[in-house]
Amino acid sequence: KQEVTQIPAALSVPEGENLVLNCSFTDSAIYNLQWFRQDPGKGLTSLLLIQSSQREQTSGRLNASLDKSSGRSTLYIAASQPGDSATYLCAVLRSNDYKLSFGAGTTVTVRA
Amino acid sequence: NAGVMQNPRHLVRRRGQEARLRCSPMKGHSHVYWYRQLPEEGLKFMVYLQKENIIDESGMPKERFSAEFPKEGPSILRIQQVVRGDSAAYFCASSPQTGTLNTEAFFGQGTRLTVV
């Protein structure tokens, strides 16, 4: 059974600081890993998808790395802004599976 | 191309009533997945459906919950005789014919069910 853990559960930083969000998973036989953003009372917005053969993906101020052998992924958000305040979810898809396993999320607050 | 559409966005039911949640997948997608998000928890898989078939319902509670994806129309998640513990956000995702989320997973906005 795949277990996904996100640390920390909550994070508060001043505007401009870089954010580092961690995700760990127990079964390294994954197909891909995806980071989502969830705003309060809203749905999930896909941020980055990393295939198992990739080491990282970048989109604008966001960079996600993947170390499959150690079961870890890190989401970096550069120069944080108040608009980055949200909950960030990590989800893993195991090989030969269709069910995503989600972490509980990291709730980020960026203070102006 | 509209995304995954869920309705209603918010649903309030009294204990013992029935709740019906609808999900229309993205155009061209014939596979639907339902997930539930309990307060302060991650999303948990409930059921995977193709048109007119339930492929995997291993995450569904054994009683009161059912799901369908008819040949025509949206997928329906039905909860009978709701209890307070059913209060949660229910999300739907869809994928194309391959049946695996091997590309970016697209989720709907969710239905927030509150049982009073």
Image: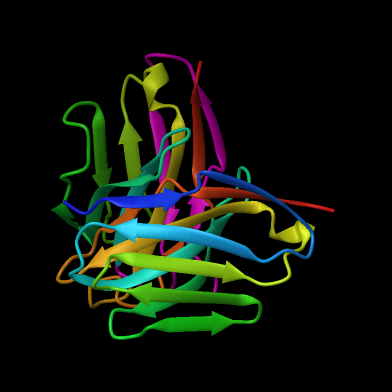
The colour scheme of the drawn protein is rainbow
- Estimate the x, y position of residue A43 in percent, counting from the top left: 55, 53
**Residue A40 in magenta?**
no
Q: Residue A91 in the image: x percent, y percent?
A: 37, 60
Instruction: Confirm whether residue B28 shows in the render.
Output: no
Please tell me which residue is depicted at 44% across the width and 76% down the height of the picture: A65
For the residue pair B105 and A79, the one nearer the viewer reads as: A79
Q: Position of residue A48 (x, y in %)?
A: 49, 74
**Residue at the spot 77% in from the left edge and 63% down from the top edge:** A81
Q: Residue at x 28, y 79 (%)?
A: A52
Q: How many marks?
A: 0
Residue B30, placed above or below residue B72: below
Q: Is residue B23 magenta?
A: yes
Q: Is residue B104 above or below residue A15?
A: below
The answer to whether residue A102 is left or right of residue B52 is right
Rendered position, B85 above or below A49: above
- Residue B64, percent across and down? 24, 26
Q: Quadrant of residue A83?
A: bottom right
Magenta region: which residues?
Answer: B1-30
Is residue B82 visible in the rendered image? The answer is: yes
Q: Residue at x 54, y 77 (%)?
A: A63
